[in-house]
């Protein structure tokens, strides 16, 4: 251990010695800045992949995921050409005093007096990011009228969303065939929805608040931490300096849910801007369509407030924000209310009350040396939950703090860049399950460095390494590597390899199992989960009869060296928690085709195979409740004058294995496998200049899992179980809403 500690300390010293030397070096002249795009409704957002080139030369670059670029100067040239497909190309004179360019392209081309408006695809791959990253834009989110994050992936082929149980309404995601706990969730590069929020957190992010979602497969950058195993989902919220002055969204559906969202932005002065985002939703109808005496959906009331500020100086900028959330959730039998005593003979119910507070700050300083900056991210979360799941009481509180200091610069020229930093994570859990204390605390300081080499747009290599120290498990290292190769413009190869770790939170991450009478058996203390992930992606773009066609194929393999196993197969009345003994892995194969066969029509087709196996009871078995395959067809059509928009999505979900039913009474056994099924969604939108009207239906055919609850007639029975959910539990959902926007 002393040797490891010595290596760790020497590594830190060497790292920062190198950084100091390189920062002090003589750099070539560099200009930098940000490129934005403005659509036909006035929305302004970073233009990922915009091309920047010196006028009359072959020297150029492209904007990254935040619209930022760096470009080496060329003697004798003072103008740059900025272009992006679907936007008007501009020529900009560079101010060599500041060497900073901030520019916005307009989404239209004028040809001989005729205005032709084009549309950027709602979902697209980041062209120059070595990490395979798909961007779901705000326009794509509107296609499903998503009320929250859990409904944001209905047109996405990579992310699956399903109910965690048949009672509470909690939802979970799957990426690469593995549970969402292995996907790092971030809000603008700040960790979020961890621990206690993992159960109901997808419902904490209102859809109208989101500007975009970035879905990255495979291992992520070491700068974002060590927890990413299968991928990363980063949520970009609307910002006062980019968005409309005011936005209203009203929504209602046939289940009785009503929702209100309001965003309001103010420019205080030239340097200070602020934005308030408010959300309120209520579902109060007691509905039991399948007549099992259980509510088909929980009764919920949620209030959510978010206030953010930005200061933009010449070299210094700062973003701060606070969020407040209160949610009350009541589920169970139709006659249950909060005053009901949870004893045999009385109605069974689940009551979850949540109060959550978040605060963050992001500050940055730009040095005189071009493209050299220092950033500091701080975030604090307080989450308090009081709940009962039938006769079981589960009360928990979580305090979390995250800090990340990031230094960025380049070596010699912008072909060689380095990102390094130190960070610190703290998580404190005070948990009680039926009076049993499950408290735990984590303190994890870490240091990291990441080097990126770029050769024009042809080749990008990115290698990162971090060292962390866990207060319980000691030191561990995280190596990660990414590569992107473009032999020609229309063909891109990506490869990745890296390691990830996480410390499981057994009860909070599996609270869906509390919606049963299974006894929790902890056979041993959890160890750090660790896994390797390897990925390969090939993206080919074609031009067929003047129309764009993109085919993306990928393969990802995740291999666990240690995993905290949640075993529901061994015993019908218990769930066992233990560390992996044997193999556990996942293979994910996917092909996705995107095209625009006719003007105004976007078509996406995708197919994925999941091979997910874990050693259970000494036998390598298919992981339960995971579909073996998935198909997706998504169609979006906007009329030529952009007055109407039609959206239609079909999801084909393959069958899979159910947890073992051995030990259950014969009359409730459901077999060994669940069947494949198909769901359809449709939406019609009437578009106006400043407002939209939309109507739609989810699960158009009304398909639902029959009898999703085992022993609903006797929920105090030892075999009662509402956690074995593999499909929809409600029928067709009809909705309508209105969006109103006022621009600056």
Image (cartoon, rainbow, N blue to C red):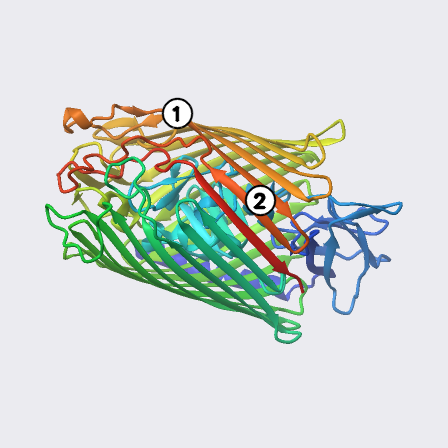
* Residue 20 visible in the displayed image: no
Left or right of residue 435: residue 451: right
Considering only vertical position in the picture, is 674 above or below 305?
A: above
Q: Give the number of the disc on residue 676.
A: 1
Residue 384, picture quadrant: bottom left
Q: Position of residue 741 (x, y in %)?
A: 62, 58
- Residue at position x 35%, y 51% in the image: 200
Q: Position of residue 499 (x, y in %)?
A: 42, 43
Left or right of residue 276: residue 397: left
Q: Give the number of the disc on residue 140.
A: 2
Q: What kind of element bears circle 1?
A: loop
- Residue at position x 63%, y 41% in the image: 645
Q: What residue occupies the far right of the structure in this picture?
A: 112
3D distance between C-alphas at marks 2 and 1? 27 Å
Q: Position of residue 44 (x, y in %)?
A: 66, 57
Q: Nearer the viewer, residue 450 or 671?
A: 671
Q: Nearer the viewer, residue 549 or 38?
A: 38
Q: Position of residue 243 (x, y in %)?
A: 62, 60
Left or right of residue 51: residue 478: left
């Amino acid at each position: 251990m002393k040797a490891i500690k010595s290596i760790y300390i020497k590594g830190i010293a060497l790292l920062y010695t190198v950084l100091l030397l390189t920062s002090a070096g003589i750099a070539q002249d560099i200009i930098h800045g940000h490129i934005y795009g403005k659509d036909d409704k006035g929305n302004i957002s970073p233009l990922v992949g915009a091309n920047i080139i010196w006028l009359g030369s072959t020297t150029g670059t492209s904007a990254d995921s935040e619209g930022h670029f760096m470009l080496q100067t060329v003697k004798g040239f003072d103008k740059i050409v900025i272009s992006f497909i679907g936007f008007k190309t501009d020529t900009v004179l560079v101010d060599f005093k500041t060497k900073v360019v901030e520019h916005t392209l307009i989404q239209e081309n004028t040809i001989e007096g005729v205005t032709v408006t084009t549309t950027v695809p709602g979902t697209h791959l980041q062209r120059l990011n070595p990490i395979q990253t798909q961007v779901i834009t705000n326009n794509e989110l509107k296609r499903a009228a998503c009320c929250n994050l859990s409904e944001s992936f209905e047109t996405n082929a990579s992310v699956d969303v399903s109910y965690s149980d048949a009672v509470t309404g909690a939802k979970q995601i799957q990426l690469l065939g593995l549970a969402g706990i292995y996907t790092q969730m971030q809000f603008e590069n700040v960790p979020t929805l961890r621990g206690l929020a993992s159960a109901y957190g997808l419902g904490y992010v209102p859809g109208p608040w989101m500007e975009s979602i970035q879905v990255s497969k495979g291992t992520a950058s070491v700068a974002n931490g060590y927890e990413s195993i299968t991928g990363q989902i980063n949520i970009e919220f609307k910002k006062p300096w980019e968005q409309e002055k005011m936005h209203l969204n009203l929504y209602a559906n046939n289940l009785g849910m009503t929702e209100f969202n309001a965003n309001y932005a103010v420019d205080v002065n030239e340097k200070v801007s602020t934005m308030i985002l408010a959300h309120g939703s209520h579902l109060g109808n007691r509905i039991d369509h399948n007549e099992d005496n259980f509510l088909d959906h929980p009764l919920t009331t949620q209030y959510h407030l978010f206030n953010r500020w930005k200061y933009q100086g010449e070299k210094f900028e700062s973003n701060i924000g606070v969020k407040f959330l209160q949610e009350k959730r009541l589920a169970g039998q139709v006659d249950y209310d909060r005053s009901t005593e949870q004893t045999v003979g009385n109605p069974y119910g689940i009551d979850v009350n949540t109060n959550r507070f978040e605060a963050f700050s992001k500050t940055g300083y730009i040095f005189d040396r071009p493209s050299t900056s220092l950033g500091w991210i701080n975030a604090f979360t307080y989450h308090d939950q009081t709940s009962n799941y039938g006769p079981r009481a589960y009360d928990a509180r979580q305090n979390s703090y995250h800090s990340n200091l990031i230094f960025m610069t380049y070596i010699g020229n912008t072909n060689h860049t380095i990102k390094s930093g130190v960070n610190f994570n703290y998580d404190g859990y005070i948990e009680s399950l039926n009076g049993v204390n499950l408290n735990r605390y984590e303190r994890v300081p870490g240091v990291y460095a990441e080097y990126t080499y770029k050769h024009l747009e042809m080749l990008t290599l990115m290698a990162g390494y971090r060292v962390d120290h866990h207060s319980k498990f000691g030191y561990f290292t995280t190596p990660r590597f990414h590569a992107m190769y473009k032999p020609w413009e229309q063909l891109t190869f990506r490869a990745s390899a890296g390691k990830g770790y996480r410390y499981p939170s057994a009860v909070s991450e599996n609270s869906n199992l509390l919606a049963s009478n299974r006894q929790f058996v902890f056979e041993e203390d959890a160890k750090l989960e660790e896994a390797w992930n390897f990925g390969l992606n090939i993206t080919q773009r074609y031009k067929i009869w003047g129309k764009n066609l993109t085919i993306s194929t990928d393969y990802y393999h995740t291999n666990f060296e240690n995993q905290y196993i949640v075993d529901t197969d061994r015993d019908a009345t218990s769930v066992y928690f233990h560390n992996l003994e044997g193999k556990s892995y996942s293979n994910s194969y996917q092909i996705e085709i995107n095209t625009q066969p006719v003007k105004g029509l976007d078509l996406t087709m995708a197919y994925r195979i999941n091979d997910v196996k874990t050693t259970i009871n000494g036998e390598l078995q298919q992981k339960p409740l995971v579909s073996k395959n998935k198909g997706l067809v998504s169609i979006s059509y906007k009329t030529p004058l952009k007055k109407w928009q039609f959206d239609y999505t079909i999801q084909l979900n393959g069958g899979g294995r159910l947890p073992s039913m051995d030990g259950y009474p014969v009359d409730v056994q459901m077999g060994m496998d669940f069947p494949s099924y198909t769901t359809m969604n449709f939406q019609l939108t009437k578009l106006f200049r400043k407002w939209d009207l939309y109507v739609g239906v989810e699960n158009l055919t009304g398909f639902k899992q029959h009898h999703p609850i085992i022993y609903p007639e006797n929920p105090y029975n030892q075999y009662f179980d509402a956690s074995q959910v593999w499909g929809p539990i409600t029928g067709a959902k009809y909705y309508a809403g209105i969006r109103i926007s006022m621009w600056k």
